Structures are given as structure tokens and as C-alpha cells.
Amino acid sequence: MEEESKAKIEETVREILKESDMTEMTEFKVRNLASERLGIDLSDKSHKAFVRGIVKSFLEEVESKQQQQQDKEEEEEEERAKEGNKEFDDDGDLIICRLSDKRRVTIQEFRGKSLVSIREYYKKDGKELPSSKGISLTDEQWSTFKKNIPAIEAAVKKMESRV
């Protein structure tokens, strides 16, 4: 097969694939449509293999583009979720989670240090304010606490089994 005819066949096959309903199209139909448009018999083995390669390449490209688009959409959705889910209290501290109506975990800045604060809140004049009931942990204290979670869980289980 000449390079010029290969290029024309590839161009025609790709055009057919681009304008086709891929749920209905088959390699046989693509080959027949290309034969009609080009006025060339594409039913011999070498032409079949060539068209098959073009179809396969086209489908891989489409799948790759779809995967890239899906990945991009998922990334954008994750970014929107991260940005959209941020909640701040009346002092501007980031609320990580609400443990109950009155208790929450926040990240706050105090005297230039970041603190993880687990605290009870109360309402005054329509504002939710932190009470003295709670604890604020520095990064180092938080790390120590996290490392000891398994031991705390084990102790709680042991305690619950006695009750």
C-alpha cells in the first residue's frame, strides 16, 4: 500500500468514526463506508488489518481523552468540595468537625501558634463563643495524642467490657 493511499484511508476512516454513533458502528461498517467513499476495495487482509489498526488507535485516543476529562472533572470536584466545605466560626477559626451542637474541633491561631481546639461553645447575643470547657493542643501535643489513639481505644474497650 502506498503512503498516499494509506493517508487517504486513515483520514476517511477517522472522519467516519468521528461522525458515527460508536454504539452502533462496527469495524465492518467502517470499512464498507470507507470503501464506498474512496472507491477502493478494502476487503483484502492487508486493508482489513490497516483499518483495524486505525479503528483501534482511534478508540484508544477517545478512551484516553474521556479518562483525562473524567480525571479533570474529579479533580475540579474535589477542589470545589475542599473549598466549599470549609466552615469558620465567629472568631474566624476553621471548624474541622462538629462533635455535637455545643462541641466542635477547630484549628485556631493563638500567639503565632496553630492549635487544635476541642471545646464546648455557648451562645451569647446570637454568637457562638468558646467556653473554658475544652482543650487546645499544640502541633507537638496533637502528634503525641494521635500516636496514642490505639492505646486509648484499647483502654476504652477494656473499660466497656467491665460494664
Image (cartoon, rainbow, N blue to C red):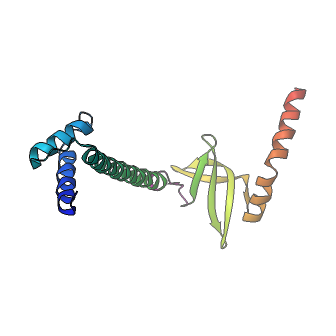
Horizontal placement of 57 versus 103: left or right? Answer: left
Q: Is residue 20 above or below residue 96?
A: above
Q: Is residue 162 above or below residue 151?
A: above
Horizontal placement of 53 versus 120: left or right? Answer: left
Quarter-of-image position of residue 2:
bottom left
Pinpoint residue 142: horizontal percent, then vertical percent: 74, 58
Pinpoint residue 10: horizontal percent, then vertical percent: 22, 54
Query: Of all residues shown, which one is farthest toward the right?
Result: 162
Q: Which image quadrant: the C terminus?
A: top right
Query: Of all residues shown, which one is farthest toward the top?
Result: 163
Which residue is at a point 60% across and 47% down the rendered structure image?
A: 97
Residue in front for this viewpoint, 122 or 69: 69
**How many labels, in total?**
0
Q: Which residues are magenta?
A: 83-91
Which residue is at a point 62% across and 62% down the rendered structure image?
A: 108
Which residue is at a point 24% across and 43% down the rendered structure image?
A: 44
Pinpoint residue 70: horizontal percent, then vertical percent: 39, 49
Determine if the magenta segment contains residue 107: no
Pinpoint residue 4: horizontal percent, then vertical percent: 18, 62
Q: Is residue 111 above or below residue 104?
A: below
Residue in front for this viewpoint, 151 or 65: 65
Which residue is at a point 85% across and 45% down the rendered structure image?
A: 151
Quarter-of-image position of residue 6:
bottom left
Q: Is residue 45 above or below residue 117?
A: above
Q: Which image quadrant: the N terminus?
A: bottom left
Determine if the magenta segment contains residue 87: yes
Horizontal placement of 5 versus 89: left or right? Answer: left
